[in-house]
Amino acid sequence: MPHYQYIARDAGGNRVTGTIEAASQQEVAAAIAGRDLFPVEIGGKQAARGLRRRVPASLMATTLGQMSDLLQSGVPLLRGLEVLRRQTSHPGMHEMLGDLHRQVEDGASLAEAMQRHQRVLGPITVSMVQAGSEGGFLEESLARVAGFIEAQEDLKGRTIGALAYPVVLAGIFTVVAVGLLVFFVPRFESIFEVMRQRGSLPLLTEWLLSTSRFAWRWSPWIALALALAGSAAWKWLQTERGEAWRDLVKLRLPVVGTIFRNLAISRFCRVLGMLLSHGVPILRALEISSEAAGNRVLAAAITAATKNISAGQTLAQPLARCEHFPETIVEMIAVAEESNRLDRVLVDIADGLQRRTFRRLDLAVRLLEPAMLVMIAGMVLLLVIALLLPMFRMSMTIG
């Protein structure tokens, strides 16, 4: 939504200026009146300007955790934002904290100020802070978001670290295989030409030579086509339809699809359980926790659950109709609703799912390394056999 500059007077006649995000000037006037101010002038709308620089997730988690500590210690929000702004050396974080300070100083809440930087902070952070502001547990919500971001970064770091060796092996093998096909194998073609004319060239060697000729002739165009296709696919995946398709594919992938699904359900259950334990209404809690899932397919199922709950149904009924929620989890939610222990059971579900998923992820990565080695060794062996087999036949013929 656009932002409007305004000039107003308070009850003492003092001049007050600021910026309000609203859909129209009428909403701006209503918001100013709601702050016990008298509007004098409302400027033209301006496009919302978010943060221009990216902020590392680790720094974001640290800053949110420090903000929670300051608020729990009794430091006022404005003073805490100013302290954090002064101590940070990252330009992007310095810019964002300065903008948050200006907006809060102009009368906006912290959640309203963060809406402007949702692309950097993420919808989960903004929604959690807004729920914390509404429910009176802002400090805890900031701490929870900081812990959530740290857990996500820890998982990402563990995954990248575990996959580094197989990826390096795959890269080296690709370079070596392309180099052999393009530069090394063509040198043998003249040697095998006599055997080809006699019809005694092994089929595997013929296939290798044909592949080498194709790679030599078309490799620049293939590289260009792959680059263009990759760029187009990347841009399409940034669209709404592309993101929905990507999230659906992630859930249906063999082995790793279960890991993606369990992590998304774990995030949803943890956030929903925390919000319900602080008295946030279930409809509002579902709206926030659907974004926490980080998957559009699951978010759509949760949104459908929200509509059914509005019609008087339970949470477990619409989730049971979604094929991506395991039956055991749906049954645990149904029993928890009957016993009025939904908030505690959801947190237990999240803890159990996370433990099992981490074990499965470690096992999958451990199995990936020997699988990559076997595949690379098999491909190298295939190349060697294709080159040596004609020589063996030639030596046998001479003998």
Image: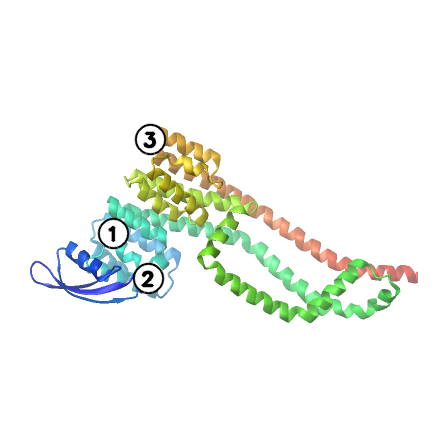
The residue where tag 3 is placed is: 340
Q: In which quarter of the image is the N terminus?
A: bottom left
Specify whether residue 302 is in view. yes
Q: Quadrant of the C terminus?
A: bottom right
Q: Neighbour class for label 3 at 10 Å: few (<14), some, many (≥20)? A: few
Residue 45 shown left or right of residue 164 in the figure: left
Name the mark on residue 70.
1
Q: Which amino acid does label 1 sit on?
A: Leu
- Give the Cα separation between the discs numbered 2 and 3: 42 Å
- Local secondary structure at mark 3: loop
Residue 224 shown left or right of residue 184 in the figure: left
Q: Neighbour class for label 1 at 10 Å: few (<14), some, many (≥20)? A: some
In percent of width and height, residue 397 lies at 91, 61
Q: In which quarter of the image is residue 4?
A: bottom left
The residue where tag 2 is placed is: 93
Q: In this view, does 374 lie above or below 178?
A: above
In percent of width and height, residue 36 lies at 12, 55
Q: Which amino acid does label 2 sit on?
A: Met
- Local secondary structure at mark 1: helix
In percent of width and height, residue 74 lies at 20, 49
